[in-house]
Image: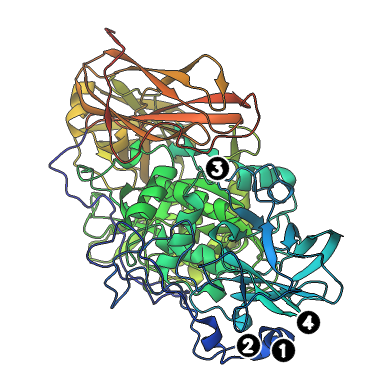
């Protein structure tokens, strides 16, 4: 489906020009080694006593501000094979990454000082973090869907712990809990948290005894709503007259702490339970593409609770070298994620590719979810080929939801790409209204997909809390790196482009005007037409609790054409590079033009039409030119392959239609990704001199995959799905690849099925083993060089296993390598 003669600049306008604002994390990119190590290296055992100069733990606990050590850094995990390291690209294993560990690993217990266990000491013989999915902690913290055995909690919310001692707990005993994260934990930076039991803590941290029975002590532990997010080591220290004791570090006692949209004191708090269910807990969603008039939709498996995904999300922060002390700030975290989901600058998750040649990786249209991408990045340390905007956005939704931020995937139709900070989309023509391509650097994408995440913005004036745009697609640099946001949607709506981060660029994407400039005889340019409703025509996301579309255009823009909307546009333009652009407008328009395109199907003939209407009281003669070309969704077009010229005479109040039929054999040789076409229409009214101009994009629909469940789905029991596909083209599809994925159902699986003949129907059967109960989405896609953007989905209602619980194992499938699958049946058209 690709034209090999095309240049590989489908992402026209994606320059590296800096924006005007100053962003965060502009420096300190992680530098990968030449060859990543396939396995983590063992970490040296730190001598914690020597670091503290022999000071007593309890002395430090009582005077915690004196715990800071000026030599302790906070720049993230230095080793991951950084500079000077020969260990390769180290990735976090099940025990965490790059962190100092308290105590010794050589025995079940140890004592401070000389290491002797004395009679009467309060020795910790065991810890129950109540970390099972069915336990109170996981259920109350809404983390019971994570396919992990470790304790996963959300900050600002208490959790319960049961301590087992060698003797009964007495009121004179002193017990303290410790949480540590990072290479050099420090109390002053929040990376070393000390929580004395029964005493008032600082910053929201405290531990209270809820029950003391025999040798067991039940605690209720309160965490700070501003806590750092990440994977903490956990230990316990005790002191009594007989001596001090410290529990050795145990990997099974590690604790993950996440953002908490259920906590009113957390700045990511969301005051709507249905929002939290959709934007934090929903593991699948809909992503929209195509054009405003022909909206396509596909189901995406976010899979934020799949085993390994949480580690991959934290690894992304580590790879960027983000200081641990800054990981409690969602503004900083979301900005880092927007930089790291793309591979530019920092060897992030996904390599962008808009060339049409995906032979060295995966066609972006073939992905069905984020899990395979994130696990590959975690496993290998290498950027994954390839992504385009909806893939970047889908992965970003996964990462931010996994970390606890309410996030949605948003599609903007007719999305502008302003390359000169004019905040207008400028199109230049010669004296005869022929486009001057060497001047037309701005482009309008058929659609663009990004993310909204919900948080307060303490770094901005009041009034800018709520939805914030984060865009991981690498288009323009921000402070020298390819990242975008978080940007307050409220500032976009009102044209306040001086608000951070990256508001000018995002404003132009949704609410700039398309300005047509014509070259004059003296070489200067004059505005001949301004299309005010051409950009950001529709902004949608998946609706809460259903698969319907939710139109959120009103959240980003005042009503089109209203006084408030015009004020926002012109306010923004005054801060652009062409502040007086609107002062030279001419307005004498009595002929209206509308473009129509039928619902076209890939492989079939089609027709496009232009309707002209004379709204004036005098006859009008219009010279009309139609030019048709294929286009990438980024607005970059191929050569014109069909054109039509016609003169139309319109009586006062009359209308006329000009049609142009297009046969499949005419457009087939020129098809590119997603089968989109661009109709350029220009006209000149002889009597008034009015200039007509319009660009209309439409797409060719592709077929869906039909999925049917064969039998009931039960946790731990094998189940079968049938996939049926009919080739809509009269040509053979070669090297066809299916992908199958569904959280709680099927780990990412690749199926190689060979060739499918023209107009042929094929049927596949695949077995899988569900691992989690409840309603699930099983998603499939098909890709070949001749046809892409083919996908299907089925809801699978999984019953619990007879004994209850889940089965945390790979539910069949291996995303690392493809499997050759014979077709169950073949049929003709």
Q: Residue at x 41, y 57 (%)?
A: 341
Q: Quadrant of residue 232?
A: bottom right
Quadrant in which the C terminus appears: top left
Residue 540 disc label: 3
Q: Position of residue 66 (x, y in %)?
A: 65, 91
Q: Which label's residue is closer to the chain start, 3 or 2? A: 2
Q: Position of residue 276 (x, y in %)?
A: 68, 47
Which type of secondary structure does the marked residue at label 1 adopt? loop
Label pair 4/2, CB-CB below 8 angstroms: no
Distance between the Cα atoms at labels 1 and 2? 7 Å
Which type of secondary structure does the marked residue at label 4 adopt? loop
Q: Where is residue 637 in the image (x, y as percent from the top left)?
A: 25, 44
Relative vertical location of residue 389 with respect to residue 79 in this rendering, above or below: above
Dot 1 corresponds to which residue? 63
Relative vertical location of residue 267 with respect to residue 390 in this rendering, above or below: below
Dot 4 corresponds to which residue? 241
């Amino acid at each position: 489906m690709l034209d090999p003669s095309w240049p590989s600049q489908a992402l026209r306008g994606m320059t590296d020009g800096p924006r005007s604002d100053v962003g965060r994390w502009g420096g300190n990119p992680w530098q990968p080694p030449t060859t990543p190590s396939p396995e983590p290296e063992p970490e040296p055992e730190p001598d914690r006593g020597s670091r503290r100069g022999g000071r007593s733990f309890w002395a430090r606990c009582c005077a915690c501000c004196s715990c800071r050590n000026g030599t302790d850094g906070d720049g993230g995990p230095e080793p991951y094979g950084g500079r000077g390291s020969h260990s390769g690209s180290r990735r976090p294993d099940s025990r965490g990454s790059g962190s100092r560990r308290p105590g010794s690993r050589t025995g079940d217990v140890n004592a401070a000082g000389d290491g002797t266990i004395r009679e009467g000491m309060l020795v910790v013989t065991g810890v129950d973090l109540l970390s099972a999915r069915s336990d109170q902690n996981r259920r109350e913290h809404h983390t019971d869907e994570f396919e992990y055995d470790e304790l996963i909690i959300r900050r600002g919310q208490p959790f319960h712990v049961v301590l087992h001692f060698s003797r009964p707990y007495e009121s004179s005993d002193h017990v303290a809990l410790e949480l540590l994260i990072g290479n050099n934990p420090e109390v002053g930076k929040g990376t070393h948290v000390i929580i004395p039991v029964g005493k008032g803590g600082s910053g929201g941290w405290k531990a209270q005894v809820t029950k003391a029975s025999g040798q067991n002590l039940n605690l209720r532990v309160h965490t700070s709503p501003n806590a750092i997010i990440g994977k903490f080591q956990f230990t316990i220290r005790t002191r009594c007259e007989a001596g001090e004791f410290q529990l050795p570090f145990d990997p099974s006692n590690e604790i993950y702490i996440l953002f908490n949209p259920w906590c009113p004191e957390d700045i990511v708090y969301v005051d709507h339970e249905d929002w939290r269910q959709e934007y934090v807990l929903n593991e699948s969603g809909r992503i929209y593409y195509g054009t405003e008039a022909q909206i396509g939709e596909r189901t995406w498996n976010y899979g934020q609770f799949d085993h390994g995904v949480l580690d991959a999300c934290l690894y992304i922060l580590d790879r960027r070298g983000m200081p641990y002390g800054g990981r409690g700030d969602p503004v900083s975290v979301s900005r880092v994620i927007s930089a790291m989901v793309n591979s530019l600058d920092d060897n992030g998750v996904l390599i962008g590719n808009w060339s049409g040649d995906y032979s060295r990786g995966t066609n972006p249209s073939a992905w069905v979810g984020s899990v395979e991408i994130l696990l590959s990045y975690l496993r290998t340390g290498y950027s994954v080929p390839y992504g385009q905007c909806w893939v970047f956005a889908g992965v970003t939704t996964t990462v931010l939801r996994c970390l606890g931020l309410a996030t949605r995937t948003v599609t903007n139709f007719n999305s502008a790409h302003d390359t000169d900070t004019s905040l207008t989309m400028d199109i230049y023509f010669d004296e005869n209204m022929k486009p001057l391509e060497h001047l037309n650097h701005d482009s309008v994408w058929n659609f663009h997909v990004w993310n909204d995440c919900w948080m307060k913005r303490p770094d901005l004036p009041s009034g800018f809390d709520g939805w914030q745009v984060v865009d991981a697609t690498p288009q323009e640099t921000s402070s020298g790196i390819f990242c975008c946001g978080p940007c307050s949607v409220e500032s976009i709506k009102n044209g306040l482009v001086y608000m951070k981060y990256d508001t000018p660029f995002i404003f132009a994407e949704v609410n700039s005007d398309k300005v047509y400039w014509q070259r004059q005889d003296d070489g200067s340019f004059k505005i001949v037409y301004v299309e005010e409703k051409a950009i950001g025509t529709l902004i949608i996301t998946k609706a809460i609790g259903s698969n319907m579309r939710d139109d959120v255009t009103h959240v980003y823009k005042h009503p089109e054409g209203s006084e408030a909307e015009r004020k926002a546009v012109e306010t923004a333009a005054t801060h652009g590079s062409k502040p007086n652009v609107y002062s030279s407008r001419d307005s004498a328009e009595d002929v209206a033009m509308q473009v129509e395109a039928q619902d076209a199907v890939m492989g079939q003939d089609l027709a496009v039409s232009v309707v002209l209407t004379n709204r004036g009281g005098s006859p009008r003669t219009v010279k009309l030119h139609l030019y048709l070309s294929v286009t990438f969704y980024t607005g970059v077009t191929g050569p014109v392959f069909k054109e039509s010229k016609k003169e139309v005479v319109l009586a006062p109040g009359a209308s006329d239609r000009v049609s142009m039929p297009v046969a499949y054999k005419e457009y087939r040789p020129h098809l590119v990704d997603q089968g989109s076409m661009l109709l350029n229409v220009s006209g000149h009214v002889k009597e008034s001199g009015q200039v007509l101009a319009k660009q209309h994009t439409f797409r060719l629909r592709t077929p869906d995959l039909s999925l049917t469940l064969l039998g009931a789905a039960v946790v731990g029991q094998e189940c079968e799905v049938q996939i049926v596909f009919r080739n809509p083209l009269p040509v053979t599809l070669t090297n066809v690849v299916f992908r199958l994925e569904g959280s709680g159902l099927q780990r990412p699986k690749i199926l190689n099925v060979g060739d499918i003949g023209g107009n042929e129907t094929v049927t596949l059967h695949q077995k899988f083993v569900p691992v989690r109960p409840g309603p699930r989405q099983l998603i499939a896609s098909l890709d070949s060089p001749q046809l892409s953007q083919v996908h299907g989905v089925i809801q699978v209602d999984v019953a619990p296993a007879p004994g209850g619980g889940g089965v945390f194992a790979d539910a069949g499938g291996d995303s690392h390598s493809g499997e050759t699958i014979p077709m169950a049946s073949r049929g003709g058209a």
